[in-house]
Image (cartoon, rainbow, N blue to C red):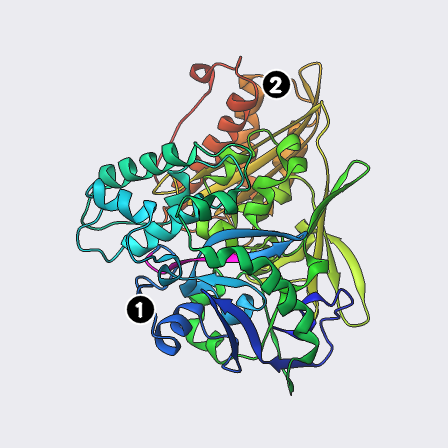
């Protein structure tokens, strides 16, 4: 594995190295000096000739290339489903990678049998992805939804009802488990092979042996988080780039609370947020928000730091944390500075980030009993799609009067933004339909949308105003939608 992967004193501008990458693929330890930017999909298929993992969209949308990734976290082995077409082998370092071949027996396991029994496969191209996602569901020690576990997989010919029936039958079977360890039960019940019981110890030894890794100096390193957008936009370029992989650095992980502030490592994934008791307590509707963002395999990979640095004007979690007035800590070789997330964006894809700096942490003040928060998003598909527009709001309210408002918005300008004038207008206002309509009139002064494939300028202005009204209707159900002065005129 990479020698620097557990180096908590990592400094981004230090000379970087190309290492021999070590991980376990199914039941076999792998040591390779192939380019770490090579995708896991290509390594599995072309280097190891394990062709059960399919090539589909190469954009993380179809799920045909789904594999499982096992990782030691706080001395516990956890497995997640990921799309191998977007995962560089550099991010496989020190982990257990499981392809469809890695869960095979002499006969069908219960997941494969359920797919067969319910007629849930026809041409079979997508079947390995569904099987891996459902197997991953059976290896989770969390209260997860079986249908949500396959939301990153698509089927072009079978029809989803038979797949859903297969999934529900697996869910029923797995409910038989009591307090038994989930991986032990999955092995005992024949969902996964016996060799899985050895993986935790083998990964521990693999990490301890990392000091002997081969080092070869390279320059001009590219920093890579989850890679879920980077590999869509620059697939060929990334394969041959000298890259530094940040997800293996322990100091960039974790979610903790210090007094009334929440501090997140930049390599925190969306799934980490979903599973955090701190986040769930602060945002009771967080699971609802997260379902509007990408799919389960992408949520398992995508990092907050990557989302921020990507600088997309419609980055969902950028919009989420802008409303929370989050701050980011930027670390360079000899510098450490903290700035408001709002100030990070200087122009389209232009950041207040010095060469060699990385985002180290994200922090924000946790909501109190007088704080109201909501996130809204509109896209062509409700789920698994890029936003046409999105917005988040944070309100401090006392006696039905807003003392402070922060509204963020995406898709209505060249950068993810805070609606400064609209937020200021709402301060001191009583919460009623008239004042919300007046605030919506101010919105036009804050934004500068353009007409493109996701809608016209006029449509996006109208859409954002509707999202702002949706914030208030969601947070204050006594408001009456029919009293809003809603008008849309296409120009």
Principal secondary structure, stretch drawn in magenta: strand
Residue at screen point 72% across, 75% down: 13
Q: Say whether residue 170 is left or right of residue 156.
A: right
Residue in front for this viewpoint, 471 or 10: 10
Q: Quadrant of residue 180?
A: top right
Asked if the magenta segment contains residue 269, the reply would be no
Report x, y in % for residue 128: 31, 56
How many C-alpha atoms fall within 10 Å of the one at disc 2: few (<14), some, or many (≥20)? Answer: some
The residue to which callout 1 is attached is: 51
Q: Secondary structure at mark 1?
A: loop
Report x, y in % for residue 450: 43, 51
* Residue 95 in view here: yes
Residue at screen point 52% across, 50% down: 315
- Classify the position of the C terminus by image quarter: top left
Mark earlier in primary sequence (2, 1): 1
Q: Say whether residue 214 is left or right of residue 53.
A: right
202 over 479 or under it: above or below = below
Report x, y in % for residue 37: 50, 75
Separation of marks 2 and 1 at Cα, in angstroms: 59 Å
150 over 4 or under it: above or below = above
Residue in front for this viewpoint, 326 or 246: 246
Q: Say whether residue 227 is left or right of residue 153.
A: right
176 over 445 or under it: above or below = above
Residue at screen point 42% across, 76% down: 236
Report x, y in % for residue 38: 46, 75
- Classify the position of the N terminus by image quarter: bottom right
Q: Say whether residue 326 is left or right of residue 450.
A: right
The residue to which callout 2 is attached is: 431
Per the rendered image, the range of residues in magenta is 64-70
Q: Secondary structure at mark 2?
A: loop
Badge nearest the viewer, 2 or 1: 1
């Amino acid at each position: 594995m990479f020698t620097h992967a557990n180096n908590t004193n990592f400094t981004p501008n230090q000379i970087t190295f190309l290492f021999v990458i070590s991980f376990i693929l199914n039941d076999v330890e792998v040591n390779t000096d192939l380019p770490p930017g090579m995708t896991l999909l290509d390594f599995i298929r072309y280097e190891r000739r394990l062709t059960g993992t399919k090539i589909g969209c190469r954009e993380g949308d179809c799920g045909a290339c789904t594999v499982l990734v096992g990782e030691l976290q706080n001395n516990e082995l956890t497995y997640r489903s990921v799309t191998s077409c977007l995962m560089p082998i550099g991010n496989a370092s020190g982990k257990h990678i499981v392809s469809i071949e890695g869960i095979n027996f002499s006969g069908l396991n219960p997941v494969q049998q359920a797919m067969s029994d319910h007629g849930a496969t026809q041409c079979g191209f997508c079947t390995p992805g569904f099987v891996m996602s459902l197997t991953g569901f059976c290896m989770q020690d969390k209260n997860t939804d079986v249908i949500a576990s396959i939301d990153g997989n698509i089927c072009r010919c079978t029809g989803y009802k038979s797949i859903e029936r297969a999934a529900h039958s697996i869910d029923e079977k797995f409910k038989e488990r009591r307090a038994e360890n989930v991986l032990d039960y999955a092995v005992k019940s024949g969902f996964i092979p016996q060799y899985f019981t050895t993986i935790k110890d083998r990964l521990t030894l693999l990490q301890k042996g990392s000091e002997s890794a081969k080092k070869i100096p390279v320059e001009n390193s590219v920093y890579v988080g989850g890679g879920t957008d980077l590999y869509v936009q620059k697939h060929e370029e990334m394969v041959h780039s000298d890259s530094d992989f940040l997800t293996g650095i322990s100091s960039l992980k974790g979610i903790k609370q210090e007094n009334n502030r929440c501090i997140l490592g930049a390599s925190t994934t969306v799934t980490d947020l979903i599973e955090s008791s701190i986040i769930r307590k602060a945002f009771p509707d967080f699971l609802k928000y997260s379902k509007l963002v990408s799919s389960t395999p992408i949520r398992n990979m995508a990092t907050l730091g990557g989302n921020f640095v990507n600088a997309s004007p419609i980055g969902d979690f950028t919009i989420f944390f802008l409303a929370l007035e989050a701050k980011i800590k930027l670390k360079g070789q000899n510098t450490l500075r903290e700035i408001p997330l709002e100030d990070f964006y200087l122009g389209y894809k232009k950041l207040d980030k010095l060469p060699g700096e990385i985002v180290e942490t994200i922090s924000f003040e946790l909501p109190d009993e007088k704080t109201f928060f909501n996130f809204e998003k509109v896209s062509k598909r409700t789920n698994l799609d890029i936003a046409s527009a999105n917005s988040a709001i944070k309100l401090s309210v006392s006696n039905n009067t807003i003392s402070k408002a922060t509204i963020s918005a995406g898709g209505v300008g060249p950068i993810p933004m805070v609606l400064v004038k609209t937020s200021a207008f709402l301060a001191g206002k009583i919460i009623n339909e008239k004042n919300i309509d007046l605030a919506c009139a101010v919105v036009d002064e804050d934004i500068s949308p353009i007409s493109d494939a996701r809608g016209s300028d006029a449509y996006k202005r109208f859409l954002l105003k509707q999202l702002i009204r949706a914030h208030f209707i969601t947070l204050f159900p006594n408001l009456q939608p029919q009293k809003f002065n809603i008008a849309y005129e296409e120009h």
